[in-house]
Amino acid sequence: MELYTYYRSTSSYRVRIALALKGLDYQALPINLVAPPGGEHRQAPYLSINPQGRVPALRTEEGALLIQSPAIIEYLEERYPQVPLLSKSLAARARERGVAAVIGCDVHPLHNVSVLNRLRQWGHDETQVSEWIGHWIGQGLATVEQLIGDEGFCFGEKPGLADVYLIAQLYAAERFKVSLEAYPRIRRVAELAAQHPAFIKAHPSNQPDTP
């Protein structure tokens, strides 16, 4: 498999975690989102791969090209079920997907670089942009804190889909200096992930394009 990725991309980080948890090998193909003049993702070679011009994108072992991290992770879950990211119980699976959706649908899109750049184009200064980021990340984490369990990872002893989304989001929280002081459950999960080989392998600091 080939993964078009960027070390600091939250959505790419999710897919890297999922791949690592499942023990799957892949070739990382970095796409520099900040390379002049406007990032490699906006240039013709990558646009011919992903017309949306975003990362990640995954080329499967069968040669199919997949985009959007939720779809890619769902594919991995169905194609490689040996290490499941979802529980067997339908209700539990829905709860796990719910946490993933809080982060993937309601938090991350609002601090995506394209959104932040549009805020700047509309005249918002960096203080206002930072307040925007902190508001949405903080609101999302406050929700997740109430939804996850009291022991282990988000929903038990083994990491799963909710952890894939949460840990990637916490990297963004750290980047944007959002405090985790009010979220003891989330801090517990973060501490466990920091010692887990899959999360270590997928971390932005350990990627081939990390500066």
Image (cartoon, rainbow, N blue to C red):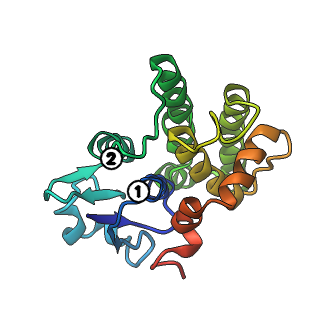
**Image vertical order of residue 53 relative to residue 180, above or below:** below
How far is the residue under mark 2 from the one under mark 1? Answer: 8 Å
Residue nearest the viewer, comparing 161 with 209: 161
User: How would you rate the neighbour count of disc 2 (Cα within 10 Å): few for under 14, some for 14-19, many for 20 or more?
Assistant: some
Q: Amino acid at mark 1?
A: Leu
Q: Is residue 108 left or right of residue 35?
A: right
Which numbered disc covers residue 202?
A: none
Towards the viewer: 181 or 150: 150
Q: In x, y percent, where is residue 210?
A: 52, 78
Vertical relation: 117 (above or below) 86 = below
In the picture of the structure, the residue carrying the numbered disc 1 is 19
Q: Is residue 123 visible?
A: no
**Vertical side of 198 occupied by 187: above or below:** above
Furthest toward the top, the residue is 91
Left or right for 188, reference 140: right
The residue that label 2 is drawn on is 76
Q: Nearest the camera: 186 or 41?
A: 186
Q: Point out the image quarter for the N terminus.
A: bottom left
**Left or right of residue 66: residue 21:** right
**Direction left: furthest residue:** 63
- Seen at 41% across and 77% down, the residue is 35
Tell me whether circle 2 and circle 1 mark residues in contact (CB < 8 Å).
yes
Counting from the top left corner in percent of width and height, residue 72 is at 32, 47
Residue shown at 70% from the left, 46% from the top: 189
